[in-house]
Amino acid sequence: MRNGLSHGLWQRLALLFLAIFLLGSSSLARAQQGAAAPENKYVGGQVCRTCHPDVWLNFNRNPHFKSVAMGNQTPEKTGCEGCHGAGGNHVAAKGGKATIKAFSTMTPGQALDTCLTCHSKDISRANIRKSAHTEADVACNNCHSVHKPATPKFLLAKQQTQLCYTCHADVRAQFEMPSKHRVNEGAVQCSDCHNPHGAFAETWRTGTGSTMLTNARENEQPCLKCHIDKRGPFVFEHEPVRVEGCAACHQPHGSTNAKLLRRPVVFTVCLECHNGGGTFGRQGNGVQAQTSSHNLQDPKYQRCVLCHVRIHGSNSDSNFLR
Amino acid sequence: MTNTRFAILLFPALLAPGLLAQDTVAPTTGEPVGSARGTNKGDYNIVQSWEAGYRFMSVGGDRGKYSGDVNYRDGFRLLSSQMTVNSKDGKGKYFDEIILSTQGLGNDPYESAVLRVAKNGLYRYDLSWRQNDYFNTALVVSAGQHAQNTVHRWEDHEVTLFPEKNFRIRAGYGGVSLDGPALSSQQEFDTKGDVYPVFRNIRERFDEYRIAADGRFKNFKFTVQRRWEFYKEDTKDNQILALKGTAPALLTSFVRPQPYRGRTPGWMGNIYGETRWIALNAHASYSSGTGDYAQNELAIGLDRFGSSANRQIAVRAHGNRPVAAGDFATTVLPGKRFSIVNNLSASNTRMNGSNLFQQYDASTLSFATVNFQFLGIRLVTNSTDAHFRISKRLDVFGGVRFSQREIRSIEDTADAGSKFDGVSGQQTNSTKAGVFGANVFLGKAFRAHFEGEIGRNDNPLTPVSLRDYHAIRSKLQYRTKTWTLGGGYNDNYNTNSVQITAYSAHSRTYSANGSWTAKSWVSVDAGYSKLHLDTIGGIVFFAGSPRAVRVTDQQSMYVSNIHAANIGLRFALRKYADLVVGYNLTKDTGDGRAMLTAQSSANAQILYNAQTFPLTYQTPLLRLSVRLTEKLRWNVGYQYYGYHEDFGLLSLNQGYRANTGYTSLLWAF
């Protein structure tokens, strides 16, 4: 087990962590000292009400209203100016997008920075800087609508499913297949499995393109949040479930095949791996092929899970028969 | 294009059944009732809507398949409700905000409720509850084996104290349960014996209790969470009637209780800091799962030779799974245009346990034991990505990824003669991949995203794992106030060829979608996707008569070409009525064959029949909503579900046609 990752490598990684953390700490302090003072004057939200009565009248229903109600926030974190910046110049100029922080004129990065001023403290957004959405320049205001939300919770611009479909039209097609997770029906939401704000690396497979999957209970694949019987621990684990993940056999969004399987007939799912060839498997001598007692011309042997009923893992049988 | 030509082209689209503000016909959404929304009560403003009605359904064909796919049934429902209560000045006595929304209460197969109650600065309570009644088809096909639903229920409660402060405390409870019938199967009394259906009464319950603290110290935010999880399963397998197998086999009695109790306490810590040019995020978690299991299986009957059989299997087992995982992400932001992100993650999973398996044969009194197995997985992943904004119109990004994984397993038994005795294995594999891409912005309306990835795993675990692969992901989008047009192309290619297992998988997805909101009273949206998949892999099996022989000269092929389309229209007659029509279609044309034809050999026939699975699934819908008064609307809707398989691949025809609909009153004020 130590051949690939020696003890020394772990020590070097630990030292690297420490060095980067210390560097980060000192830079934080330097950055605080160098913060620029605002040029504008804060005028307070009541002034904004004069020209934006429609926004103000509904603002008490908005979660951001609490910055006003609590009365203990600094002006740069209170009400309208908490997001749009000081309004002094805007008032003096009698409006105009050039004199205020208007989200419609911001770059994605600027919008992200503005929102993170307050919204960075939740762990759910700890990875937003490295998320695939940020990399693709999808910023907060692409999905959230602060003043005209479709949902009072999270202030989404549309219902979550429709919002995600706006860009992920191919995924929508998968959720309209006969066998699928019930996203369109409201039983499941995209955010049950994905964190649109970015996620930690997956712990069950080697990294490829980020799918922003949320690790269930910090270090497990998200399927196990609901499919509790597949979680184990089992005395006899079916390795691909732990090593490659559920997607080795299932299509997670939807499929034309029953049980969201990758193939319509189950024996092909099994035998494409269990063919004994190559250097695959735990022992490097191929994944165990079936034995001569399985005559595939007999239909019952074409349905492997008829007998291997505990295919996700078993506590009593190494061949998952019970 | 002239306006006239455009109108001619558009007209059929307007007539086509279609829009999809949503994909199920009910509940009704999007139809406002009057302009005045909300009433004031004391210091609070209340906005609410309630939709109640009757849902009806009739099914022809395979009802089991319908219940597995759709499962809407007759009956009265509270189809949806929404309520918000907000204090007008943000200084309510006990609360400042209540948000409640529900769907499908009263026996719809998809029921949910979300509740938030909050007092600014003091507390926030969040509840999420969902229930899905689903038809558990047990095996690969439904075959209408039974007509009862399994109930899958989720709930989560979380209380946050001082939610807006620099230090806050969270405590929560989450529960998941499954309860209901399913069919399973059991082979008796040996590996060549008959397979009998077995009734399974599923009873599973997961409970999680957690407490956490979030804090901020200078520019660092930290989170610490302690978690306790409990899992119990009391599923019991029973055979109700004596089942006759292939003569002279007979299973007269079968019972298998198999209780399981598991516990997984865990810790999680996270520390996060960010300033103008650097962001750091460190995360670590540890959980230690254990499970205790017992089984007492008793099967009585006649074996395939006609001899009486009386077999008892007793198992007691204990499993452990400690999992440790850590992540360290560094984001360097040297300027407005440039960022570098490095993420290093490591996880270590060890699964081991003891298992005592005892099998008693009443005639021979023989027994066998298997008592230990270990599986360990260690994974280290590093990714480094750089993102550079060249101009307002263009930015580019690229990155490298490296993963190293070690898998070690031990099989050991107390039976020195067993093939599992002392078998151990170790395998190390690494994945190296590169990604690159660009984002293009032309004005505010147009954006494009291109991304490519190429990678290689030097020693994949299975023949279908990624070995030599590449992927392309691209999206185009044009958005104005009235138009949204989008398109995308994705492909994923993987080859994993050695010896017998020449495996390759190609998937390509093309998609296009658009919506047009011409006026507030008319809108159209439509989408089309083509999902192509072809795979070919080596396959080895035994087949033949009278003796099965090893077959290595066949290949497993699978081809699907799925065309998925949706189109819809929303038309409003001023404030008085809303009409929504929509159509969804999923059609797998397979590999183009019109029918299954006879092959030259029985072995070739087995694989030929499994190569493609053409089918059609369509769900048109129609909904009309009429305003009765300023606060009241009457809604009626109809949705058809049609499922048709072109070939009887699975030895039975699972096609169905279902007519569903509803009528309701929506009261909003």
Image (cartoon, rainbow, N blue to C red):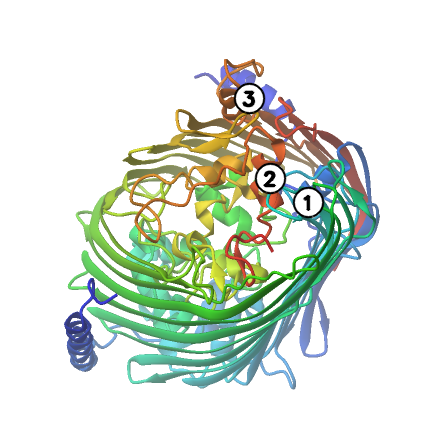
Residue placed most toward the observer, B458 or B49: B458
The amino acid at mark 1 is Thr
> Pointer 2 and pointer 1: residues touching (CB < 8 Å)?
yes
Circle 3 marks a residue in which chain? Answer: B
Percent from the top left, x then y, of residue B183? 71, 49
Secondary structure under badge 1?
A: loop
Secondary structure under badge 3?
A: helix
- When asked about the image quadrant of residue A279, the answer is top left
Q: Mark 3 points at which residue?
A: B10
Between the residue at mark 3 and the residue at mark 2, the CA separation in whole angstroms equals: 37 Å
Q: Please, is residue B8 above or below residue B314 in the view?
A: above
> Pointer 3 and pointer 1: residues touching (CB < 8 Å)?
no
Q: Name the residue under label 1.
A: B137
Mark 3 or 1: the one toward you: 1
Do discs 2 and 1 share a chain?
no
Q: Name the residue under label 2.
A: A258
The amino acid at mark 3 is Leu
Mark 3 or 2: the one toward you: 2
Give the side of residue A192 with respect to residue A111, left or right. right
How many numbered marks have been drawn onto this rendered protein structure?
3
Residue placed most toward the observer, B28 or B466: B466
